[in-house]
Structures are given as structure tokens and as C-alpha cells.
Amino acid sequence: MPMFAATKIFRILWIFLVAAFLIYLIYKLYMYWRRNPIQIEIPIFSLFFSILYSYVLITSFMLSQYADVLGFYRLLELLIVMTSILVLLSATSFKSLNLLDLIQKALLINFYLIILILLFWLVKDHSMIFQLETQGRVRLGGSVYSPNELGIIGSLSMWSAYYLLFKNHISKKFFVFTLLIALIIVVLTNSRTSMVIAFGSILFMLHKQNLINKLAIIGMTFIGMIFLFSTFNIDRLGYGNDPLEELKTLNNRTYIYEVAFDGIIRNPWFGVGYVEGTKEFLKENFTQDFWLPPHTHNGYIEIALSLGIPFFVLVMLISTRLFFLSFRNIIFNTNKITVASSMQLIIIMVTAMTTVDIGNAVNPLFVLFLFYLLTNGQLLQDPHRNLHQAGKR
């Protein structure tokens, strides 16, 4: 069996499961509506953004010279997920449904499902999940899951557990257990960005959250991130052609960005195509012999390269609003539930500068980010409001 065949089977099973859930959800909502007729609405912004996103995705794919069967599958996968979120948004008229609770539970459940998959491969073939990479680092994830994404999911799951603890959905023991498991996974992924974020998150959670302490912890985490980013373009660290340099992977990305920027300039309106288009573009234009990047290692550049500059500008405008709203919450808001959700968005948007938690294939990080985009960030303002009301301006 080819190296990635088994993981593709898991992915196809997952998308069929999501599609089955979507059909079941639509059926249940229809049956409920027949018994209890109520007005069902989708916030205008969410509907507009979804239609525009779908149009850009399909247009980019059709115009791309890299369109293939796998590309069709990527489109199907994302469109199913987006449709599911829109259906959930339309269900917010039902007062018994708290979508913010649901998304946090889903993220935590997803985290433990990933752990089960990792344990499965640990028994079946541990070399699939624990591999020595080109630059000499042994990392958890391997061929089954991206180590960088796995590390970030671990950090986000800490905040989901934090959120659910203060909503009394999980016990303190389960919260501490989740933190320990997530921290172990983050360390084993050997992802420097994720480790800075995970340790900073735990310090933020456990320390008294007055304004001075918050600023101090954020400052320390920021210094850690600055140290990571400062490794770019430093001659003594070597360049991407030397796979033995410890910080090679950060330094090497400057060349990826050069190639990506060239692709953006050559394909400014609709990009080179979602996921598979970017992969094929890099395959044809990335000239280093020992390593071929599967993506641009930057979520924002990924969006511009795969879907074009106009859509990139729109996403950046919305993301900037979400970032400042989230940052204001973690500094001044005393509501731990709001802080948890805001911290998750901050993590996603910051780590998008070194990896592709947004702008690439569907994953829990991108789905969470998309969820907040589609609600126009309203959930960050008051976690106790009904989402249907929050969608109205």
C-alpha cells in the first residue's frame, strides 16, 4: 500500500461522515420546522461571504491549469463544510442551541479523535506518525498529520477545555488531563511556534488575570515569537540548501515566499487554484533539490496565491477586525469564556504567519476561523447572546 493511501482513506471516510451529518441535520431541522413553524434566517454577511467564497473557489479552479480529480475533491470537501456551517447558522432560531458551545465541544472531540488515530498508527506502524524530517528533527505527526497543525490544534484544544470548564461542561480533572495531553503532543511535534504559544497559554490560564499580568504574559510570548521570526535571513544560520541547520525551516521559507510572490504577480485575480493548484505551482517553480514544500508556510500568502489578491484583501480586512476585537477582549474583558474564544482566534491568526492553519485544506483550525468569519465576529462580543440575534446588526 502506498505511503499515504491509508491516510487518504481516513480522509474520505471523514468527508462522507460530514456529508451524512449534514443531510441528517437538514432533515431534523425540517421536521422540527414542520412541528414548530418559525422564521429561519441566515445573517446577510454570512450568506454574501459564502456565495463570494464559493464563486472565487470555483472560478479559480476552472481557470487553473492544475485542475484535476483531487482538485474537485478539495472543492467538494470545503463546500460541504461551508454548507454545514450555514445550516447551523440558520438553526440559531432554536433557543436550545448554543453554537459557541457546540463548536468548542466539536474542537475538543476532534482533538481526542486525532489522538485515537495517532494511537492507532502507533500500534500499526509508528514510523508513520513519528518521523525524522529533512533538517534532522524527529517530529510527531509524520505522514498522518502535519506536525505544525497538530501543535496548534493542541494549543487551541487547551482553550476549548478552558472554555468548557467555565461553562461547567467538563470537570477540573478532565481539564487538567487535557492540558497535560495537549502539552505532551505539542512538545513531541517539536514545533517551536506551538511550544511558545502552548506554554504562554498555560501561564495565561493559571496566573491571576489582572491587567499587568496579562500584559506581562503577552509580552513574554511576543518576545518568544520575535525570536522565531528573527531567524529569517540570518546568514550564519544557513539557507535552505543546508538541511542540517537547526533553524533551516524558518530561514528556508524566505525562498518559498519569493516563489509565491512571483506566482501572485503572475496570477493576481483568481490565483493558481485552491490547495492542489498551489502544490503544483510550487512543484514546478521551487528549485531546491532536497525538499519540496506542499504549501507556502504562510496562510495569508496561501490565500493570495491560491485565490487571488481581491479575495485576499477582503479576508484581510475581516481578519484585521477580528484580530483587534480579540486582542481587546483578552486585555480588558474579564469574562473567561470570551477570553478563551478570543485567544483561539489570536492563535490562529498569529500562527498563520508561519504555517497554513487558514487558506489551505480543510482542518479544524480553518473551520473555526471560517466559523467566526461567517458570523462576522459577533460571538466575540457577547458569548451569552443567541447567535441568530448576534448575526443581525
Image: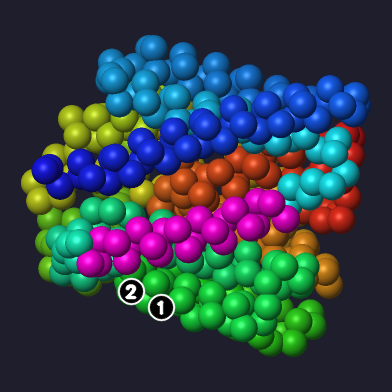
In the rendered structure, which amino acid carries the disc numbered 2?
Leu
Residue 288 location in percent, x, y? 13, 45
Helix, strand or loop at mark 1: helix
Residue 82 location in percent, x, y? 58, 31
Indicate yes or no whether the magenta region holds residue 118: yes
* Placement of 322 over or under 55, stated as above or below: below
- Left or right, 143 with reference to 32: left
Which residue is painted at 61% across and 77% down in the image? 175
Mark 2 surroundings: few (<14), some (14-19) or many (≥20) residues within 10 A: some
Q: Is residue 224 visible?
A: no
Which residue is painted at 83% across and 69% down in the image? 335
- Left or right, 81 with reference to 218: left
Please name whichever residue, 344 or 176, is drawn nearer the observer in this view of the structure. Answer: 176
Helix, strand or loop at mark 2: helix
Indicate yes or no whether the magenta region holds residue 333: no
Question: Marks 2 and 1: in contact by CB < 8 Å?
Answer: yes
How many numbered marks are there? 2
Q: Bounds of the magenta span?
A: 101-123
Which residue is painted at 83% across and 26% down in the image? 33
* Placement of 391 over or under 348, stated as above or below: above
Which quadrant does the C terminus fall into? Answer: top right
How far apart marks 1 and 2 lie (CA) works out to 6 Å
Q: Which mark is residue 188?
A: 2
Please name whichever residue, 254 or 53, is drawn nearer the observer in this view of the structure. Answer: 53
List the residue tagged with mark 1.
184
